[in-house]
Amino acid sequence: MTTALISADNHWMLIAIMFLSTAIAICLEQKYSWAAKMSGAIITLIIAVFLVNIGIIPTSAPVFDDVVWGYAVPLAIPLLLLRTNIRKIGKDAGRLLIM
């Protein structure tokens, strides 16, 4: 097992890399049409996979469990649901939504 350049205990650096990769993904999504088709979340995941494969960040760290799954994902789900168009979902889904 190889060690990453940034250790799993270096929480601030891992959080900074997460924020930076998210910012890069958002900028790419707003500037290029190919990135808008992929969405910022997918681009962020691709950046993370690339950084893991070249050995910069570890594959698992406590900060991923605590910050991402403890705070970011539970906060993101209601924010995404608030942006949904219920009328469009009802029109597109039709009777399947009622069932």
Image (spheres, rainbow, N blue to C red):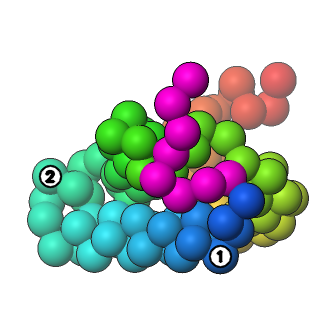
- Residue 46 location in percent, x, y? 36, 44
Does residue 83 appear anywhere in the picture? no
Q: Dominant secondary structure of the magenta stretch?
A: loop
- Residue 28 location in percent, x, y? 23, 67
- Residue 41 location in percent, x, y? 46, 54
Residue 46 lies left or right of residue 87; in this view the side is: left
Nearer to us in this view, 40 or 9: 9
The residue type indicated by label 1 comes to Trp
Q: Residue 99 occupies which quadrant of the picture?
A: top right
Q: Is residue 30 above or below residue 36?
A: below
Q: Which residue is disc 1 drawn over?
A: 12
Magenta stretch: give its range.
Answer: 1-8
Q: Which residue is disc 2 drawn over?
A: 34
Nearer to us in this view, 26 or 47: 47
Residue 77 lies left or right of residue 27; in this view the side is: right
Q: Dot 1 lies on which element?
A: helix
Does residue 67 appear anywhere in the picture? yes
